[in-house]
Amino acid sequence: MAFGSVFPQAANAQALAGTGYDAGTSALETVATELTKYIPYVVNLCYALAGIVAIVGAVSVYIAMNNEEQDVKKKIMLTVGACIFLIAAANALPLFFGITN
């Protein structure tokens, strides 16, 4: 029974093997064009996440400063680093997919 369920998939793979690389390259081109449609939304999402991280981090730093904790500098550096990473990732993502504005 297990062999019977695997056999049709193997036959399908062999049927596509004779077509060459055209089917694979056209499928990859289709996927690439579909992905490029979502890039602006992902960039805006990264900017929104950077804003949320900045607000939550600022509140966390404020509470830590009022409680006179010793790791305030560490919290500041982590918040700033996370915001810089998200902004840099949002700027680098279109370049990764070859999209120019």
Image (spheres, helix red, strand yellow):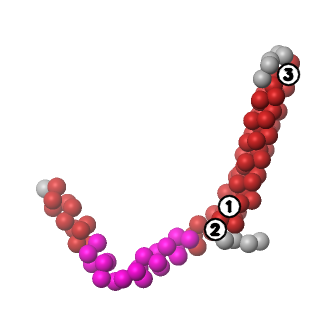
Residue 41 in sight: no
Q: Position of residue 34 (x, y in %)?
A: 57, 70
Mark 3 secondary-structure assignment: helix
Q: Which residue type does callout 2 highlight?
A: Phe
Magenta span: 13-32
CA gap, disc 1 to disc 3? 35 Å
Picture quadrant of residue 11: bottom left
On screen, 98 above or below 88? below
| In this rendering, position of residue 26 left or right of residue 32 | left
Mark 1 secondary-structure assignment: helix
Q: Which residue is mark 3?
A: 65
Q: Is residue 21 magenta?
A: yes
User: Which numbered disc flags the more N-terminal residue, 3 or 2?
Assistant: 3
Q: Which residue type does callout 1 highlight?
A: Leu
On screen, 34 above or below 25? above
| Residue plotted at (72% across, 49% down) | 86
Mark 2 secondary-structure assignment: loop
Q: Which residue type does callout 3 highlight?
A: Met
Label 3 crowd bin: few (<14), some (14–19), many (20+), radius 10 Å: some
Which is more toward the observer, 39 or 84?
84
Residue 82 in sight: yes
| Residue plotted at (69% across, 65% down) | 94
- What's the mark number on residue 93? 1
Per the picture, the main secondary structure of the magenta-coloured stretch is helix
Q: Which residue is mark 2?
A: 97
